[in-house]
Image (cartoon, rainbow, N blue to C red):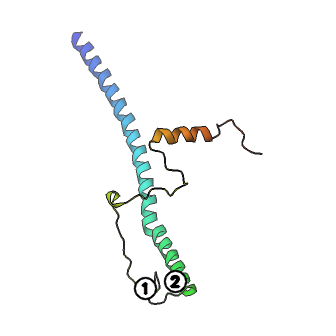
Amino acid sequence: MKALKAAQGQLREAEHKLSRVQTWSQQIEREMSDYRGAVQRLASALEVDIPNARARLDTMVDSLELTWPSHPGMPGSASEKATVEIVRPEEVQVQPPADGQPSAPQNSEESDEDLRETTPGPNENTAP
């Protein structure tokens, strides 16, 4: 009798575990399906949308070049190479305001307070 109860307990536990495995298996199938859909959309974008967009941009560039042909020595011409200048924050020099012009607030609390005073509330109607 004791062995029968132990076997029945093991059977219930096994059935419970089987139920959980089936639930998780269905969840994994749903997740895999969602993943496949997302990957398919990405693959479509990589294979179709991006080349199409590039072709459209190339057509636009060609059209612009026909409309405004570049001349040697002109800014943006094909004969000029683009240069990029990187400015680091410590290299920037701020000029003080000219006489008669208001200066920027010294701290953020001051500017926040000014903004609160001049900004209408959400229920205030500012229309004439």
Q: Secondary structure at mark 2?
A: helix
In the image, 82: left or right of 104?
Answer: left
* Placement of 90 over or under 109, stated as above or below: below
In the image, 45: left or right of 92?
Answer: right
- What amino acid does circle 2 point to? Asp
- Report the front residue among 57 and 112: 112
3D distance between C-alphas at marks 2 and 1: 13 Å
| 2 or 1: tag closer to the N-terminus | 2
Q: Position of residue 13 (x, y in %)?
A: 30, 22
The residue lying at 52 percent from left, 83 percent from top is 62
Which residue position holds label 2? 62
The residue carrying pointer 2 sits among few (fewer than 14), some (14 to 19) or many (20 or more) residues within 10 Å by Cα, namely: few
Q: Which mark is residue 78?
A: 1
Q: Could you say which quadrant of the image residue 121 lies in?
A: top right
| Quadrant in which the N terminus is drawn | top left
- Report the front residue among 33 and 38: 38
